Each structure stands twice: as structure tokens, then as C-alpha cells.
Image (cartoon, grey):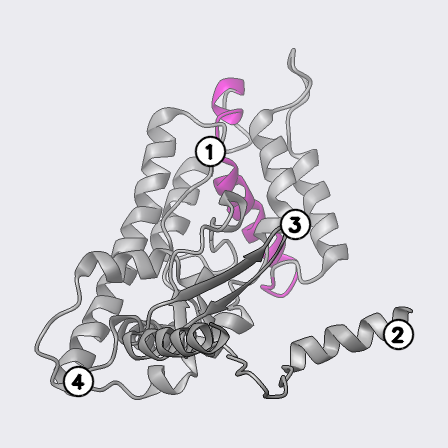
């Protein structure tokens, strides 16, 4: 029975490797059980379901012309605005407005470290009007709260860089999977612009509906423009590799939206132990065993 089960598991593992599909193995005896997961040699994940707080990429330190134009429009004569207008300026426009003011006295540089960000936050806080029944303004409170998390350069995580430099991404062939073709296209976009495509989402904020919708359209328009450039890179790679089928635009669009959070897991087959053979522990098991001995 043991021989048959191990032989069957070995065959399933071989077929899973050939078909590039995940395989789960669960063995239960009474209240005790263990499981193993067999993943393909390269198991990429596009939709990693990141939290909403981590998906907003506002690009306040690398604004594009349309976003700066929107800011200038919404903050012109900021000091002379009526109380109602002043209290409804979207906080993104406020941050960009005061960033431009900050740069004038800091050699054109945005706040670089925690100390400078704290000083900038104080500047924004002091600009809020307090001679009203509320004793402050909600949009300025939102701006102050967003300083530390929003004034960061749009970087790329090490896991995403790993995908951009993976052998599968660097060399596109006729039978290369769609994931790698799109990763190649976005990698070219990153090399050219130093940033990933704009996702296009905007967080909720205190603003008039028409101003908020206008701001949404600024980000969505930029996202569509970035997507169009990535799609052009995809089509070029397809033609260059002689691919006969084209990748669906929706797949490229989803990849662009999730580009900052894509993952790659390098899988390996099950370690099937045959009767009479010595168990070969992996590095992780060795590490766990060593740490347990140290604790004891």
C-alpha cells in the first residue's frame, strides 16, 4: 500500500509539473495531518488582493502636467477664497500646492526625511482656517494625515524587480506565457520612465462632487495613457517573437493596475519518500530543526 501511494503521488507530481498547475497533498491520520503544496517552477500571481491603503499611488512627488494644472486651478487665490470654497479644496490639491511653495525655499526639492516632512506637515496644518464653528477644516486634516504616507518616491519593491530581471521576462519567445510578455512590457515602461503605470484609483476625500470627479478623471486619464504605452510594448514583443495569438487587452490592463503588487513564487515538486530510503530534509526544515534545538 505504501509503495502504491508513493508511486501515485510521484506520478501526480510529474503530471502537475508538466501541466504547470498547483497540486495539494493532504495526509490525515486521526487528529494528526500534514499537507504539502507543489507549485510550478514559476508561479506568478497578478491579483494579490492588496489592502486598499496600499493601492493608492498618487505620485505627488512626480506629478504630471494635467495633475499640476488641476492643482493650479483649484488653489488659485487660495487665501482669498470664501470659507465654503476653502474648506472643499481636495486635499491632494492642497498638498501639491504647498509642495510647490516648499520647493521655492528648498532648492526645488520636496521634503526628504522625517524631520522635513514633519515641518511640512506643520506648514499645512497652520494654513487651515480655525475661525469657524468647527474650529478647523476637514480637508486640511486629511492633507496633514496624508503627508507621511503620500510624500514618498514611487519606488518598486524587490519582488517586482525580481520579476523584471527574471530570465523568462528578459527573453520573449513564441511560446512565452502571457504573464512574462506583459512583465517584459511593463519592465520597458519602468526603464523609460522610472516608475510603474499609474493605477488610476483615488481615495475618498472632502470635496465637492464635481471637483472629485474631475480629479478622478485626471488619474484615470493618466492610467489609460500609461496602459496604452504598455499595450504598445506588448504588441511589439508579440510581433518580434512571432506569436500568432494576441494577449487580451483586459489582461494587460489588470496587470498595469496591480503592477506594484505582483508576486512570483518559485515552486518545486513534492519530496516523495520511498520505502527504505533516507529522508532528505530541505533547507527550511533544517533551519526549523536547528532553531528548535537552540531553544531547548
Q: Picture coordinates of residue 185 (x, y %)?
A: 29, 74
Give the mark, 4 or 1, whose residue is nearer the N terminus: 4
* CA–CA distance in space, label 2 to label 3: 40 Å
Question: Which secondary structure type mostly characterizes the magenta part of the structure?
Answer: helix
Q: Name the residue under label 1.
A: 204
CA neighbours of label 1 inside 10 A, class few (<14), some (14 to 19), many (20+): few
Disc number for residue 82? none
* Residue 288 seen in render: yes
Q: Picture coordinates of residue 203 (x, y %)?
A: 46, 39
Q: Mark 3 points at which residue?
A: 148
Report helix, strand or loop for mark 2: helix
Give the mark, 4 or 2, whose residue is nearer the N terminus: 4
Q: Which of marks 4 and 2 is in front?
A: 2
Give the mark, 2 or 3, whose residue is nearer the N terminus: 3
Magenta residues span 83-109
* CA–CA distance in space, label 3 to label 1: 17 Å
CA neighbours of label 3 inside 10 A, class few (<14), some (14 to 19), many (20+): some
Report helix, strand or loop for mark 4: loop
Q: Name the residue under label 4.
A: 174
Amino acid at each position: 500500500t505504501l509503495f502504491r501511494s508513493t508511486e501515485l503521488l510521484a506520478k501526480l507530481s510529474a503530471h502537475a509539473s508538466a501541466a504547470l498547475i498547483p497540486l495539494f497533498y493532504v495526509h490525515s491520520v486521526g487528529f494528526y495531518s500534514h499537507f504539502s503544496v507543489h507549485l510550478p517552477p514559476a508561479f506568478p500571481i497578478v491579483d494579490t488582493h492588496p489592502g486598499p491603503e496600499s493601492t493608492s499611488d498618487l505620485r505627488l512627488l512626480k506629478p504630471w502636467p494635467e495633475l499640476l494644472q488641476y492643482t493650479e486651478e483649484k488653489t488659485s487665490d487660495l487665501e482669498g477664497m470664501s470659507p465654503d470654497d476653502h474648506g472643499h479644496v481636495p486635499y491632494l490639491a492642497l498638498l501639491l500646492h504647498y509642495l510647490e511653495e516648499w520647493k521655492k525655499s528648498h532648492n526645488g526639492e520636496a521634503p526628504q526625511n522625517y524631520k522635513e516632512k514633519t515641518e511640512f506637515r506643520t506648514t499645512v496644518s497652520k494654513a487651515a482656517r480655525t475661525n469657524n464653528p468647527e474650529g478647523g477644516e476637514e480637508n486640511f486634516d486629511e492633507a496633514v494625515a496624508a503627508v507621511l504616507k503620500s510624500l514618498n518616491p514611487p519606488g518598486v519593491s524587490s519582488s517586482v524587480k525580481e520579476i523584471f530581471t527574471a530570465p523568462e521576462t528578459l527573453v520573449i519567445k513564441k511560446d512565452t506565457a502571457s504573464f512574462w510578455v506583459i512583465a517584459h512590457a511593463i519592465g520597458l515602461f519602468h526603464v523609460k520612465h522610472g516608475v510603474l503605470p499609474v493605477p488610476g484609483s483615488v481615495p475618498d476625500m472632502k470635496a465637492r462632487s464635481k471637483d472629485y470627479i474631475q480629479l478622478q478623471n485626471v488619474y484615470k486619464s493618466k492610467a489609460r495613457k500609461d496602459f496604452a504605452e504598455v499595450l504598445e510594448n506588448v504588441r511589439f514583443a508579440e510581433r518580434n517573437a512571432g506569436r500568432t495569438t494576441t494577449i487580451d487587452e483586459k489582461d494587460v490592463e489588470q496587470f498595469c493596475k496591480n503592477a506594484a503588487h505582483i508576486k512570483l513564487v518559485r515552486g518545486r515538486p513534492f519530496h516523495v519518500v520511498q520505502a527504505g530510503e533516507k529522508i532528505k530534509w530541505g533547507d527550511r526544515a533544517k533551519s526549523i530543526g536547528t532553531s528548535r534545538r537552540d531553544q531547548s
